[in-house]
Amino acid sequence: MFETNPFEHEFHIALHLAENDLGPTPLCVGRLQDERGTPFMIRAYEPGVVHSSLSDASLHELNLAKTCLDRLAALHVPDIPSYPSARHYAAELTNKMSVLLDYWNAETSKLGSLVYSFRELELGVATLFRNVSSWNGKTMHGDLRLDNIIFQSDRALLLDVGACCIGDPLYDVAYLSAEPLDAVGFTRILRLLAESDGSAIITELIPLALFSALAWTLERLIHLENNEVEENLLGVDVEVSLQAYFESKAKYLHLLLNGGSLT
């Protein structure tokens, strides 16, 4: 049984973004009439293109994404969390995972090695962001994976906006850029999505973006293990895919925390 409906909060954020031409219109939110009370949210269909790789996005599409993020940054979205620094944002991720792991059963779980890796990286990220002050206090998406952007001919629209908060939009670019790219691709993304003085900040924020991706993945795996996700997302293939994703991101974050290169 799902105790809460996570889409209730997202519905209101999505509605506000839709009113400002930044996302599809949410139509309704509720629960299925099944024994689990599975939560759902339905959005209006918006035609467009969703890319699987940043290298597939055209110059025009990247400019549309930048315009969309710039407009989001200037938007006042009611009742969203506010984080005064990257350190506070990292701490919120850590606190959320600590609450989840307090109820995690280490004796019966198969996720022990992943939890250990996460805890180890957690310490490294906390140390890294203890003194980072680059954080501008504007609205950010918070989960800007490429599959959360619909590209149309004249605009980009944002999906899955439940993590929207007051932070720094350059974090969104860091999150989007956290996939391993070659040196040319990485430089191209930074040049197109950030001002010249923002590239260094984005590079600095990529470890935090990776840590956030790890937290989301581990949370999903724990919910899968406890059968606390939608039935269509259950299965060995999903678990294997998520574990491989976690391991690749953890390896990448280890590299960065030890002074390795981004590309």
Image (spheres, helix red, strand yellow):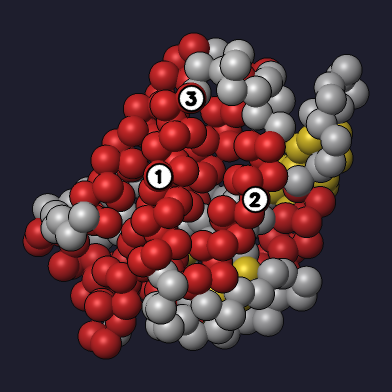
What residue lies at 33% left-to-right and 62% top-to-bottom?
206
Q: Find disc 3 in the rendering and name its residue.
A: 112
Vertical order, 124 against 226 (above or below):
below
Earlier in the chain: of badge 2 and badge 3, it is: 2
User: At label 1, which amino acid type do we have?
Assistant: Glu
Give the secondary structure at mark 1. helix
Give the secondary structure at mark 2. helix
Q: Position of residue 82 (x, y in %)?
A: 66, 74
User: At label 3, which amino acid type do we have?
Assistant: Gly
Q: Find disc 2 in the rendering and name its residue.
A: 96
**Disc marking residue 201:** none
Q: How far apart are marks 3 and 1 (CA)?
A: 12 Å
Quadrant in the picture for the C terminus? bottom left
Earlier in the chain: of badge 3 and badge 1, it is: 3
- Neighbourhood count class around disc 3 (C-alpha, 10 Å): few under 14, some 14–19, many 20 upward: some
Q: Where is residue 124 in the image (x, y as percent from the top left)?
A: 37, 56
24 with respect to 31 (left or right): left
**Residue 194 occupies quadrant:** bottom left
Give the secondary structure at mark 3. helix
User: At label 2, which amino acid type do we have?
Assistant: Lys
Residue 179 or residue 119, whichever sits in front: 119
Q: Find disc 1 in the rendering and name its residue.
A: 120
254 with respect to 92 (left or right): left
181 with respect to 202 (left or right): left
Q: Where is residue 224 in the image (x, y as percent from the top left)?
A: 61, 23
| Residue 6 visible, this orientation | yes
Q: How far apart are marks 2 and 3 (CA)?
A: 18 Å
- Neighbourhood count class around disc 1 (C-alpha, 10 Å): few under 14, some 14–19, many 20 upward: few
Q: Distance between the residues labelled 2 and 1?
A: 16 Å
